[in-house]
């Protein structure tokens, strides 16, 4: 995929809009992570309480380091060893929309490896929101064809990669405790 394929979704994100796009797991709803109004729209679209934090995608560890106070060594080791898409909850988020940060100051972030996401993140230059493309409390869609009509018509732009192979389940979500032990939030 070349840079031209991401110009339209990139422009939507830059202009305070939401997109529907394939990730390394399931289809996601995305926007600029620093744009409080766009983040609010994502919460409204998902009919989700804004006290429940959303996941963000980053291109690499360098990008990640700009949005959290520190990256635990054990998180870096874990990321090197796993091939499974894994979202890690990091304490002390920074430079994000306030309504994106959990009440305890944490943020859930995943390094996404798909070509489309890598190109989008590279061109945008900062992370994007990535929450599953479903209304809260309903099943996560297994593919594009399973996405609810309210989501399809509610986002500002749908990336034209409906045949893109995504995984059929969300990422694993983990958190490290003070002793360095992994706490699995979602497997």
Image (cartoon, rainbow, N blue to C red):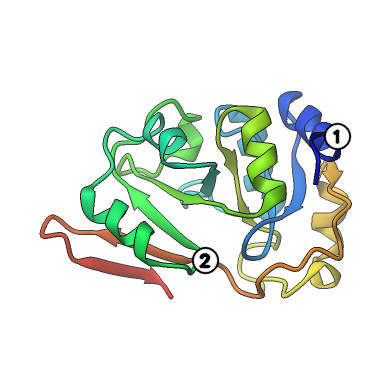
Mark on residue 29? Answer: none
Q: Sort mark 2 into few (<14), some (14-19) or many (20+) by Cα contacts within 10 Å.
A: many
Location of residue 78 in the rendering, given as x and y in whole percent from the top left corner: 31, 61
Dot 1: element: helix
- Residue at x-position 63% and y-position 37%: 121
Mark on residue 171? Answer: 2
On screen, residue 56 versus residue 44, left or right, reads left
- Nearer to us in this view, 155 or 83: 83
- Nearer to us in this view, 13 or 148: 13
Mark on residue 4? Answer: 1
- Residue at x-position 37% and y-position 58%: 79
On screen, residue 100 versus residue 182, left or right, reads right
Looking at the image, is mark 1 or mark 2 nearer the viewer? 1
Question: Above or below — where is 82 with respect to 47?
Answer: below
Location of residue 45 in the rendering, given as x and y in whole percent from the top left corner: 72, 50
- Residue at x-position 52% and y-position 49%: 54
Question: Above or below — where is 62 with respect to 116?
Answer: above
Which quadrant of the view contains residue 170? bottom right
Quarter of the rendering occupied by the C terminus = bottom left
Location of residue 164 in the rendering, given as x and y in whole percent from the top left corner: 80, 63
Q: Sort mark 1 into few (<14), some (14-19) or many (20+) by Cα contacts within 10 Å.
A: few
- Residue at x-position 22% and y-position 49%: 73
């Amino acid at each position: 995929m070349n840079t031209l394929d991401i110009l339209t979704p990139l422009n939507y994100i830059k202009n305070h809009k939401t997109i529907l796009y394939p990730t390394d797991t399931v289809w996601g709803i995305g926007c600029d992570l620093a744009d409080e109004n766009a983040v609010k729209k994502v919460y409204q679209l998902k009919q989700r309480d804004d006290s429940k934090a959303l996941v963000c995608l980053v291109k690499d560890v360098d990008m990640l380091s700009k949005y959290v106070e520190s990256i635990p060594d054990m998180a870096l080791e874990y990321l090197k060893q796993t091939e499974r898409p894994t979202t890690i909850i990091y304490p002390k988020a920074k430079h994000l929309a306030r309504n994106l940060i959990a009440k305890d100051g944490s943020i859930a972030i995943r390094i996404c490896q798909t070509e489309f996401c890598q190109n989008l993140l590279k061109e945008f230059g900062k992370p994007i929101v990535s929450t599953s493309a479903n209304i809260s409390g309903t099943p996560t869609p297994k593919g594009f064809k399973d996405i609810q009509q309210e989501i399809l018509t509610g986002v500002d732009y749908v990336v034209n990669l409906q045949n893109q192979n995504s995984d059929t389940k969300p990422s694993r979500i983990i958190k490290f405790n003070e002793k360095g032990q992994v706490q699995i939030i979602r497997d």
